[in-house]
Image (spheres, rainbow, N blue to C red):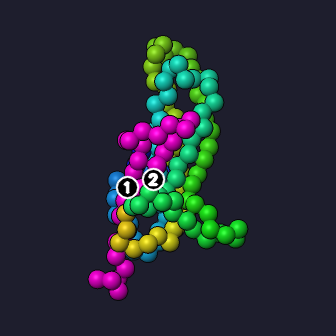
């Protein structure tokens, strides 16, 4: 997983712009999470469900205003990979995801964490944290 300004998947590859940051703002800006999943050979040909959600430094869901009221910032999807011909049995199979986000009005001088979950499982290294800069009038 990698924080970036934008990302795209084409022909199974991740194309990433402005990657590797951990501080953003203070003004809202577009951002993306680029994810490369190594699917175990034995998990091929099985439907998998993923979720990506943003929490604050207290572990609470980050909410944004929508026409339907406040909603948490979260994205979900599914993937399934087949076993490509001519690769050795047991090889991991790549899945690339590019999740691009519109500018989000996040609290200044705060820490946030993206959590990634596959099939209800979350691992410690499936997180990305970042901090928002203080507002100009807070300096």
Q: Secondary structure at mark 2?
A: strand
Q: Nearer the viewer, residue 135 or 72?
A: 72
> Mark 1 highlights which residue?
129
Say if 14 sits above or below 130 in the image. Answer: above
> Mark 2 highlights which residue?
114
- In primary-sequence order, the first of circles 1 and 2 is 2
Question: Magenta stretch: residue 135 in it?
Answer: yes
Picture mark count: 2
Quadrant location of the C terminus? bottom left
Q: Are marks 1 and 2 in contact (CB under 8 Å)?
A: yes
Residue 33, x across and y down, in percent: 47, 51
Horizontal side, residue 19 vs residue 38: left or right: left
Q: Is residue 84 visible?
A: no
Image: magenta residue range? 112-139
Q: Give the farthest residue toward the left.
A: 139
Residue 123, x across and y down, in percent: 42, 39
Q: Secondary structure at mark 1?
A: strand
């Amino acid at each position: 997983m990698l924080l970036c300004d934008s990302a795209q998947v084409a022909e199974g590859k991740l194309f990433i712009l402005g990657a590797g940051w951990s501080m953003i703002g203070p003004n809202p800006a577009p951002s993306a999470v680029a994810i490369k999943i190594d699917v175990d050979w034995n998990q091929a040909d099985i439907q998998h469900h993923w979720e990506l959600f943003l929490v604050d430094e207290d572990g609470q869901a980050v909410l944004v205003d929508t026409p339907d009221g406040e909603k948490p910032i979260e994205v979900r999807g599914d993937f399934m990979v087949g076993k490509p011909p001519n690769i050795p049995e047991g090889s991991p199979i790549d899945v690339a995801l590019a999740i691009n986000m519109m500018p989000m009005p996040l609290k200044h001088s705060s820490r946030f964490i993206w959590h990634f979950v596959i099939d209800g499982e979350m691992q410690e290294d499936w997180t990305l944290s970042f901090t928002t800069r203080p507002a100009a009038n807070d300096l």
